[in-house]
């Protein structure tokens, strides 16, 4: 198990187990198994009942949670620093000793099926899944994290236990912690818990190191651009998403693209598309750009919702903005402000202990080491106007852009 630690000055401590698993590692016909298994992690271990697992940290005033993505499952806890040992013990117990009672599986299956229905009632969320499914069709990244109801209904205890046993192994795990303690003390409590709970006998912890990185995967096949209009959905707004395949987590061009996406439609009022579509013309309430990175691919998207009569105008304005970004380099002054804005957002986000412990695990899993804020800042500062223009021209090339509309 890889290990990384960061010292803080807070009375609150954070810890997490990151498992290199997720939707992309599911076998054909098992869509949603990773997410379903994540739900079942809280349904009891060999020494703790479901009620004990769910209330243990809360009784200490802390929080216990988990989530699944296409490439990882994470179990994390927040506690007062004096309770960190208890939190570490619980995370290890969950990671290695779950029992998956039959009655809990059937009950939680109904919960996840309801979650899928809830998602389908939220077009602003469902459209992302549908778009990614078409963009990555025929690849391991196509399946939505929640999976498909028809597959989940077939997932019995044997399937779940086999998946858990196969994926939840020490060499496939990464433990991160942020606390106001000596690193040696935290390492000791993690190693002892690992020996106590691991079904593999507790092989121990390994330091983070560049040699631990898994390396880049072979690039996935690229599908032709598509244009999809769905009339199956009846909503007050028309929802639209457009975008294209982008750079993987190992591509150096991910840095200028991240900056470009923030300029176009980041979480700020002065993003180009927000100023254009909302502030200047009043066509939308919300428009946002995002960039998702995977180990062998990426996806850059722009989402907005508007009145049906405004759809064509919104699309033309967005495509015009993207074309301009690929043709005209940004001014030096505007580039410097854009960098400062992104660096400020990064610094504020990293000031949160939970965000830190989760980011550390993702970095450790992806690159074999924790990339410090100073290194990230240097990469952003090094971006040139020509690099921004070049990634805009390549990623948002009109021939590469796909779009999906919920009419």
Image (tube, grey):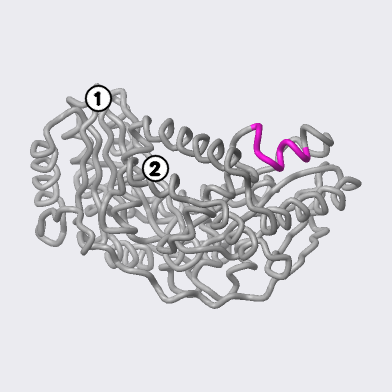
Numbered circle sitting on residue 377? 2
Q: Which residue is mark 1?
A: 80
Residue lying at 69% horizontally and 41% vertically, measured from the top left:
272
Q: Residues within 10 Å of mark 2 (few under 14, many from 20)?
A: some
Residue 218 pos. (x, y %): 42, 76
Under circle 2, the secondary element is helix
Query: Which mark is first along the chain, 2 or 1?
Result: 1
User: Is residue 2 on the magenta stretch?
Assistant: no
Magenta region, main secondary structure? helix
Q: Residue furthest front?
A: 332
Q: Secondary structure at mark 1?
A: strand
Question: Image height check: is 286 above or below 303?
Answer: above
Which residues are the magenta region? 269-277
List x then y, in percent, for residue 48. 23, 42
User: Residue at (77%, 56%) from the top-left corner?
Assistant: 405
**Would you identify the image quadrant in which residue 90 lies?**
top left
| Residue drawn 33% across the image and 32% down it | 353
Question: Between 306 and 245, which is closer to the camera in this rendering?
Answer: 245
Q: Position of residue 220 (x, y in %)?
A: 50, 75
Q: What's the residue at 26%, 23% (across, down)?
A: 10
Labels in figure, total: 2
| Residue 212 image position (x, y, % from top left) | 22, 62
Q: Name the image quarter holding the N terminus.
A: bottom left
């Amino acid at each position: 198990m890889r290990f990384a630690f960061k010292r803080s000055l807070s009375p609150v401590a954070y810890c997490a187990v990151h498992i290199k698993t997720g939707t992309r590692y599911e076998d054909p016909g098992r869509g949603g198994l990773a997410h379903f298994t994540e739900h079942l992690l809280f349904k009891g271990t060999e020494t703790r009942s479901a009620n004990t697992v769910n209330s243990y940290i809360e009784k200490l005033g802390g929080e216990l949670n988990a989530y699944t993505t296409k490439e990882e499952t994470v179990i994390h806890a927040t506690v007062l620093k004096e309770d960190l040992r208890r939190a570490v013990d619980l995370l290890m117990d969950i990671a290695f000793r779950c029992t998956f009672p039959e009655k809990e599986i059937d009950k939680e299956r109904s919960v996840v099926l309801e979650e899928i229905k809830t998602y389908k009632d939220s077009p602003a969320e469902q459209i992302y899944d549908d778009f990614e499914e078409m963009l990555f069709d025929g690849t391991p990244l196509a399946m939505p994290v929640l999976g498909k109801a028809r597959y989940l209904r077939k997932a019995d205890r044997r399937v779940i236990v086999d998946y858990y046993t196969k994926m939840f192994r020490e060499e496939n795990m990464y433990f991160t912690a942020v606390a106001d303690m000596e690193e040696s003390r935290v390492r000791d409590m993690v190693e002892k818990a690992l020996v106590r709970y691991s079904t593999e006998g507790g092989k121990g912890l390994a330091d983070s190191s560049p040699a631990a990185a898994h390396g880049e995967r072979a690039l996935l096949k690229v599908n032709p651009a598509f244009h999809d209009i769905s009339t199956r959905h009846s909503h007050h707004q028309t929802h639209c998403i457009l975008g294209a395949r982008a750079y993987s987590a190992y591509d150096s061009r991910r840095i200028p693209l991240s900056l470009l996406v923030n300029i176009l439609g980041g979480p700020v009022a002065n993003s180009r598309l927000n100023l254009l579509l909302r502030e200047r013309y009043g066509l939308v309430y919300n428009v946002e750009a995002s960039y998702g990175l995977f180990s062998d691919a990426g996806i850059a998207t722009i989402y907005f919702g508007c009145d049906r009569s405004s759809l064509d105008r919104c699309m033309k304005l967005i495509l015009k903005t993207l074309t301009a970004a690929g043709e005209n380099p940004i001014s030096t002054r505007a580039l410097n402000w854009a960098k400062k804005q992104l660096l400020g957002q990064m610094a504020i986000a990293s000031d949160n202990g939970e965000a830190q412990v989760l980011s550390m695990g993702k970095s450790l899993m992806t690159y074999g080491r924790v990339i410090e804020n100073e290194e990230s800042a240097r990469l952003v500062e090094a971006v040139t106007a020509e690099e921004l223009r070049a990634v805009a021209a390549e990623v948002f090339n009109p021939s590469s852009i796909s779009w999906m509309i919920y009419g």
